[in-house]
Image (tube, rainbow, N blue to C red):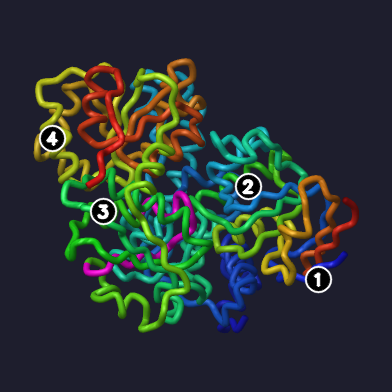
């Protein structure tokens, strides 16, 4: 790989030990993908809580505040978890505080944002905003944030951004579809696309709402490795099918019909009874529209289960200003800029201890997948309304949709 | 028998093969404290990956995969080597950071030639897979 003089000095340890280790890692990664060089990043997004502390210390050793913007993925909030009475949250407090202190010294911003920001949830940035970011792990993202560099590879290159795989909807009427339906479709698509291939989805109504497009693309890398999904008629690089495909023929056409949707919906449910102990929203982080709908459904109600809505710091603040947060909290729900799936404090035994919820309902395929696998709890997947009903009654009455 | 492949993460290792003809993510598909695959209804549910030569199709899933790999490595629960059809940057980053010898793009059909339980040597630096014993 060709390195600039400055990058060679980074690699020689002339800046900081952390910068040296970061560049070493990025060069090895770039070499394995035949990247010709490193390029500067304009923006980094990292997760300090997911990052094991010894790796965090290695990468940030001696590193001065960075000139480029860096924000953070939702972190754990052990002090709040403790206040909620989750017994094992204590063990995380010190590590969290140590990393957070270093994070702020670096001049990085504590946004606690999940899906819309660069480097971590790459698929949304590539697909919805046309930002250029390759698929990249949390630890590699930290290396990029520390050094301000990233290998020129994969989706940073225009020629790799055209869809090689095409999804066509077969006789599916999407008129009544909710967020959950788009989650389900995305989860099916991700499972069907081999490896790291851009995909185009054709046949949906044009100018689909932002929340629907986001639900669709975000579910793809849960069941697969899709990092760029063109939704024809809705996303910036797909005004037409031809533009999404770069005027080439797709390598493979995948058809999705009623049967595929039903099977996927069923597969997202992992349960043997109807008892719901927890309900999770905000995977990806809830938008203000979602929070408004949830608060309307919860007005004057009392919840039987615990309920967590994950949203970024800025959306949470807006929800408080709007009065939505007060309604949700009065009903007994919790509102916090954390990850409600992988880092859900109510379902994680290492945070909740003996108070761990053994079952959870969600309207997100991504959440269903990670609640079942990372927390190991029973999972109910259904619509927003079905989840709210479950939160109020503690019972699951959700059904597989009747596809039109 | 030898199969040539492309280097993802350098190094040499060997062990019993565990073959899965599907995609894999360290986040979700590996319990870093036990080395087992915890996924309900997964074909390899409950199988232990620790010290195996793990053969699968591609990487997938959350970008937190490299964090789980790091913790699994500290717990001694990483595969000894990885062979896959085509790596992707999250998987590649994870195996480079944890130093797990890994190759992809094998020149022959590994799912035809390698079965679970076969003894396999991987020289990832040279890009050579050697199937030693059935």
Image: magenta residue range = A218-233
Q: To which chain does the residue with label 1 belong?
A: B
Question: Is residue A110 visible to the viewer in this orientation of the structure?
Answer: no
The residue shown at (85%, 67%) is B2
Q: CA distance from mark 2 to mark 3?
A: 43 Å
Q: Could you tell me which secondary element the residue under label 2 belongs to?
A: helix
| Contact (Cβ within 8 Å) of mark 1 with mark 3 | no
Q: Compared to A149, does A260 lie above or below? A: above
| Contact (Cβ within 8 Å) of mark 1 with mark 2 | no
In-front residue for pair B45/A152: B45
Give the crowd class for mark 2: few <14, some 14-19, many >=20 residues within 10 Å: many
Q: To which chain does the residue with label 4 belong?
A: A
1 vs 2, front mark: 1
Question: Is residue A248 visible to the viewer in this orientation of the structure?
Answer: yes
Residue A99: x percent and y percent?
48, 44
The residue that label 1 is drawn on is: B126
- Whether B83 is among the magenta residues is no
1 vs 4, front mark: 1
Return the residue found at the far right: B133
In-front residue for pair B13/A274: A274
Give the crowd class for mark 1: few <14, some 14-19, many >=20 residues within 10 Å: some
4 vs 3, front mark: 3
Residue A18: x percent and y percent?
58, 60
Query: Residue A52 is drawn in which quadrant?
Result: top right
Q: Could you tell me which secondary element the residue under label 1 belongs to?
A: loop
Q: CA distance from mark 1 to mark 4?
A: 59 Å
The residue shown at (40%, 72%) is A163
The residue that label 3 is drawn on is: A172
Residue B67: x percent and y percent?
56, 47
Q: CA distance from mark 1 to mark 3?
A: 50 Å
The quadrant of the rendering that contains the N terminus of chain B is bottom right
The residue that label 4 is drawn on is: A324
């Amino acid at each position: 790989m060709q390195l600039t003089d400055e990058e060679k000095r980074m690699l020689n340890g002339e800046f900081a030990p952390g910068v040296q280790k970061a560049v070493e890692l990025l060069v090895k990664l770039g070499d394995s993908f035949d990247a010709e060089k490193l390029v500067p990043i304009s923006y980094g997004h990292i997760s300090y809580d997911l990052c094991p502390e010894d790796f965090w210390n290695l990468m940030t050793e001696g590193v001065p505040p960075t000139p480029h913007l860096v924000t953070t993925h939702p972190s754990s909030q052990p002090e709040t978890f403790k206040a909620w009475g989750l017994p094992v949250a204590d063990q995380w407090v010190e590590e969290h505080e140590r990393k957070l202190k270093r994070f702020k010294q670096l001049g990085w911003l504590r946004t606690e944002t999940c899906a819309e920001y660069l480097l971590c949830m790459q698929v949304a940035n590539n697909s919805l905003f046309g930002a250029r970011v390759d698929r990249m792990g949390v630890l590699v993202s930290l290396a990029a944030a520390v050094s301000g560099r990233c290998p020129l590879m994969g989706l940073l290159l225009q020629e790799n951004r055209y869809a090689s795989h095409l999804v066509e909807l077969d006789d599916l009427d999407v008129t009544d579809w909710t967020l959950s339906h788009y989650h389900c479709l995305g989860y099916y698509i991700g499972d069907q696309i081999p490896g790291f291939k851009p995909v185009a989805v054709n046949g949906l109504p044009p100018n689909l709402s932002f929340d629907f497009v986001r639900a669709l693309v975000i579910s793809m890398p849960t069941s697969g490795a899709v990092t760029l999904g063109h939704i024809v008629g809705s996303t910036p690089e797909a005004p037409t099918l031809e533009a999404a495909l770069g005027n080439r023929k797709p390598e493979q056409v995948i058809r999705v019909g009623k049967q595929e949707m039903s099977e996927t919906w069923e597969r997202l449910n992992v349960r043997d009874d109807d008892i719901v102990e927890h309900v999770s929203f905000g995977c990806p982080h809830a938008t203000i529209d979602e929070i408004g709908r949830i608060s309307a459904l919860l007005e004057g109600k009392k919840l039987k289960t615990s309920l967590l809505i994950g949203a970024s710091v800025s959306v949470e603040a807006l929800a408080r200003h709007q009065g939505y947060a007060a309604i949700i909290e009065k009903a007994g729900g919790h509102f916090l800029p954390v990850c409600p799936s992988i880092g859900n404090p109510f379902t994680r035994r290492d945070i909740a201890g003996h108070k761990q919820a053994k079952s959870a309902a969600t309207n997100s395929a991504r959440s269903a997948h990670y609640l079942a696998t990372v927390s190991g709890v029973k999972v109910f997947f259904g619509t927003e309304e079905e989840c709210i009903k479950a939160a109020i009654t503690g019972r699951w009455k959700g059904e597989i949709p009747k596809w039109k | 028998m030898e199969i040539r492949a492309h280097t993802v993460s350098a190094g040499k290792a060997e062990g019993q093969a565990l073959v899965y003809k599907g995609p894999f993510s360290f986040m979700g598909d590996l319990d870093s404290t036990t080395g087992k695959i915890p996924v309900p209804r997964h074909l390899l549910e409950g199988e232990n990956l620790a010290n195996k030569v793990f053969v699968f199709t591609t990487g997938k899933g959350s970008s937190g995969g490299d964090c789980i790999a790091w913790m699994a490595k500290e717990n001694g629960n990483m595969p000894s080597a990885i062979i896959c059809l085509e790596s992707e940057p999250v998987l590649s980053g994870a195996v480079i950071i944890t130093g797990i010898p890994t190759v992809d793009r094998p020149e022959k059909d590994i799912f035809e030639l390698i079965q679970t339980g076969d003894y396999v040597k991987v020289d990832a630096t040279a890009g050579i897979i050697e199937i030693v014993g059935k």
